[in-house]
Structure formats: structure tokens, C-alpha cells
Image: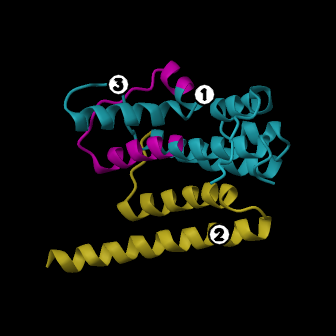
Amino acid sequence: MRQEKHTIPPIQQWAAPVLLGWLLPGAGHFYLKRWNHGILLLFAIAGMFGFGLLMRGRMFEPQTGDLFTTVVHWGGYIADIANGSLYFVASWLGYHQDQLAHAVADYGTKFLVCAGLLNILAIVDVYEIAVGEKP
Amino acid sequence: MYLSLTHLQAALLFAFFASIVLGVIGRNSDKERIRYGLGVFGYFIAAIFGLGWLMYLGHG
């Protein structure tokens, strides 16, 4: 049986759009001149992140303990970081929310995490466009 | 400033934003993207109301 050889495309081809896409949602698409897609992604991801803040969602911090605690906190932290500059600016401006017993704040926490996860999808999309796997 | 939303409002807002992203990255032509985005939004709505009724009826 013949096996296809997959090679990683040269880093110069995709590093800049991927990095920009992480730093600012949609910026990778702007770099590749996909203006409409970039605007829509920026609007949707920044919008979700903004509503998460307005609902007083909590940012995750790395924490270890039992397996569930470790997975939830590290997973949430990585997803929050995936928001790029949105996360860093909010943290830099002093946004901090302790765990609250409000349902709305809990929704806000999910909004912040999901905005990061959606940005990861956008980064994968920009990578595929940059290396020519997607038209 | 604190935004207090109901569960329904938060779920609709989530569906709106998530559908835009999934629509943009999910297909290869603009027509397909719009159709896919609207479809995803419709599935979100169906899931919100379907699960809502299921929980209401299951709760007794």
C-alpha cells in the first residue's frame, strides 16, 4: 500500500497570518485580504468576548488538583488566552472577577471561553487559506 | 456596567455570534456560507427550544 507523504508547509507561508489571527480575531484574514471575512470574525468574536465581560464572566487561571479541576482550569485558561489581545488588554486594564454565584456571570464565563475557541477555529481557517488548502 | 440577561437572551446571543463564525469558516463560497450560517443558527434555535421544552416536561 502506498502512503502519501505529508509535509508541513514552510513557516514563512503561514506564520504571519496565524500570529495576527491570534493577536486580533480576523486580523489574519485582513492580512490575506479577506476583508469581509475578517470584519465578520472580528465582530462576532470580539462581540462574544465583550458580552462575556459585560456579564462579568470569570477568566480562568491555571490550577491543578484532581483531573477534572486540572482539565477545566487549564482548558479554560488556554481558551481565554486564544482571545489574544482581547484577553491581554482586559487583564492589563485590571479586569478580574471572582467566582460568583450568579447564573449570568456563569454564562459570561462561557462566552469568554467560547470566543477563544471560535478564534482557534478562525486561526485554523486562516492557516488553511495561507497554505492553499482552502480557496 | 453589568448586563443581566435571561437564559434565553444569552443563548440567542451565543447562537448569533457562533453562527457567524461557523458560517464564515465552514464553507467555500459566499452563497454556501450564508446558507450554512443560517442553518447553524436554525439548529441552535431548535436545540434551545427543544431542550427547553424537554427539561420543562421532564421536570414534571
Task: Give the color of chain B as drawn.
Answer: yellow
Q: Amino acid at mark 2?
A: Tyr
Q: Position of residue B24 (x, y in %)?
A: 69, 57
Up-down relation of residue A103 to residue A64 (above or below): below
Do the numbered discs 1 and 3 sit on residues whose CB atoms are within 8 Å? no
In the image, the segment drawn in magenta is A88-116
Q: Residues within 10 Å of mark 3 (few under 14, many from 20)?
A: some
Q: Are marks 3 and 2 on the same chain?
A: no
Disc on res. A62: 3
Q: Pointer 1: what residue?
A: A85
Label 1: element kind:
helix
Residue at horizontal 69%, vertical 42%?
A5
Please give left or right for residue A16 compared with residue B49 in the image: right
Q: Residue at x 74, y 47 (%)?
A: A39
Q: What's the distance in space between the residues labelled 1 and 3, CA to CA?
A: 19 Å
Q: In percent of the image, x 79 and y 26: which residue is there? A: A12
B34 lies left or right of A44: right
* Magenta-colored segment: predominant secondary structure: helix
Q: Who is closer to the viewer here, B45 or A78? A: A78
- Which one of the lettered chains is coloured cyan? A
- Three-letter amino acid code of the residue under disc 1: Ser
Separation of marks 3 and 2 at Cα, in angstroms = 36 Å
The circle on residue B36 is 2
| Sequence-wise first label, 1 or 3 | 3
Going by the numbered disc 3, the residue's amino acid type is: Pro
Residue B59: percent from left, percent from top: 16, 74
Circle nearer the viewer, 1 or 3: 3
What's the chain of the residue with tag 1? A
Q: Position of residue A123 (x, y in %)?
A: 64, 40
